[in-house]
Amino acid sequence: MSESKRPLPQPTPETKHFWEGTQAGEIRLQKCDDCAKVYFPPRPFCPGCASRNVTIFKASGKAKLHSYVIHHRPAPGFTPPYAIAVVELEEGPRLMTNIVGCPQTPEALPLDMELVPHFEKMNDEITLPLFQPAKG
Amino acid sequence: MLKQNEIAVVGAAETTRLGVIPDMSNIMLHADCAINAMRDAGLKPSDIDGIACAGESPTNMAHYLGLTPKWVDGTAVGGCSFMIHVRHAAAAISAGLCTTVLITHGESGKSQIGLNRAPAGRSSLMGQFEMPYGVYGPPSMFTIPVMRYLKETGTTIEQVANVASIQREWSAQNPRAMMKDKASIDDVLNSRMIAWPFRLFMCCLVTDGGGALILTSAERAKDMPQKPVYIMGTGESVETPMISQMADFTRSRAFRVAGPEAFKAAGIKHADVDHLMIYDAFAHLPIYGLEDLGFVGRGEAGAFIMERNTAPGGKLPMNTNGGGLSYTHTGMYGMFALQESVRQMRGTAPAQVPGAKISVCHGVGGMFAASGTIVFTNEA
Ligand SMILES: [Zn+2]
């Protein structure tokens, strides 16, 4: 997978902690201090109850493969075929990612397979949270 | 709630040509069908006092067409924007904000001439949390929930492919359809791989074209040239712009708000529906739609379609123009679903459902982000 040309995120004040987290090898989620909702993507208030009392915390990193496609057309920075996946974190939230460290085939990508993060440094500012099979 | 059958569609037309139109820009496609719709309704630009559109701004269209609107709606939530425009327009006319609304869609989706569309920025939520992972257009995104749906419901990929196969039976009857050749389930499953498990024939076409509607009060419709098609009930909703963040990958929350709202407003039961359009940007959408709108139970839609219930001769004819999979799909197909519902209610569809009195037209926008549902009838 050629990584150089993929479109990279541009953090905002509300998401900065997430991208600092991936640089530190952590997936940082947020939890509401009032209703206990854990949520993603980042924002400085709870999407469950609109409380501003929220705490950033480090997720365990444990995840399961929720759904995916294997894209067969070229996209900037990617060599097809490659899987575009959504994983469900142990804490509940889901995020889009790529699965690395295994063949990009249906056989190698059973739903609900256990995954762990693989932090891929793209440049000095951005490290992407990719995932790989837990035993891989 | 909007009163049933108080507002009617009195003008409806598509662009003169459909498919590949490299000699027209995006805004001209809007204008081409708008002119056709005004002619269909026997109206002049000076008769139009409300404008709604997506893909071009209402300002652009009012200026280009020479309109002086006193009501505008630029709701742009993807391909179902036009269902939502119909809903908003009906409410506006009912409230006396205007009398006659023109709704336009035009898109140079294939030829890409004069498009007014900005991609999501790198700092948007999609830019930060989806675009870095190789998503590249709807075929790589709208399809992502499907593996989950198949696993949880036991639906097979053959049943999904069959949606495309059945719709070719409808498009074969439609001279304006882009893809008219029959396609078996095997043909669909042997077409080019796009985003596993989705093959080419399970993905919508990419075309140029447009469509326009004109709405006014049922009272005024009596004196107009076309058989009125009444707005019986409507619904709308949005969920999330990010496919990765939809609450349940096996159901659309937006469908489950918009659909029941429209049925409730119309005061109808599922058995009352004679004709159905479910926006099929991809082959799984009619399956989600049939379940989320309550036509069948959870996980039953694949088998329901396989049993030919939605096919020609079936009890619930669906996507009778051939759909986004085989008729046309400019990028925001919802307008074409509405056009087919209106044709069916007028009795002028190429694959006319005999005696159809109630048509449900259900739209999706932006990767399950939005939804709009309209119930039409030809009986006041
Ligand atoms: Zn909360």
Image: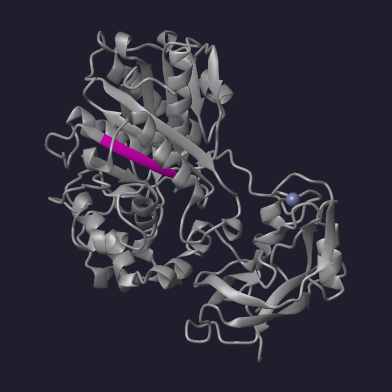
- Point out the image quarter for the N terminus of chain B: top left
For the question of whether residue B211 can be seen, the reply is: no
Task: Report the residue at 35% width, 71% height from top.
Answer: B157
Query: Would you identify the image quadrant in which residue B277 lies?
Result: top left
**Magenta residue check for B362:** yes
In this view, A57 is above or below A11: below
Q: Position of residue B315 (x, y in %)?
A: 16, 48
Give B86 or B21, whichever is nearer the viewer: B86
Query: Would you identify the image quadrant in which residue A80 lies?
Result: bottom right
Give A61 or B74, whichever is nearer the viewer: A61
In this view, B14 is above or below B5: below
Q: Position of residue B89 (x, y in %)?
A: 46, 22
**Magenta residue check for B329:** no
Mainly helix, strand or loop, the magenta region? strand
Please give left or right for residue B84 compared with residue B269 in the image. right
Q: Which residues are magenta?
A: B359-364
Task: Report the residue at 22% width, 38% height from top.
Answer: B272
Q: Residue furthest bottom?
A: A135
For the question of whether residue B171 can be seen, the reply is: yes
- Point out the image quarter for the C terminus of chain B: top left
Q: Position of residue B161 (x, y in %)?
A: 31, 66
Please give left or right for residue A126 compared with residue B80 in the image. right
In this view, B376 is above or below B185: above
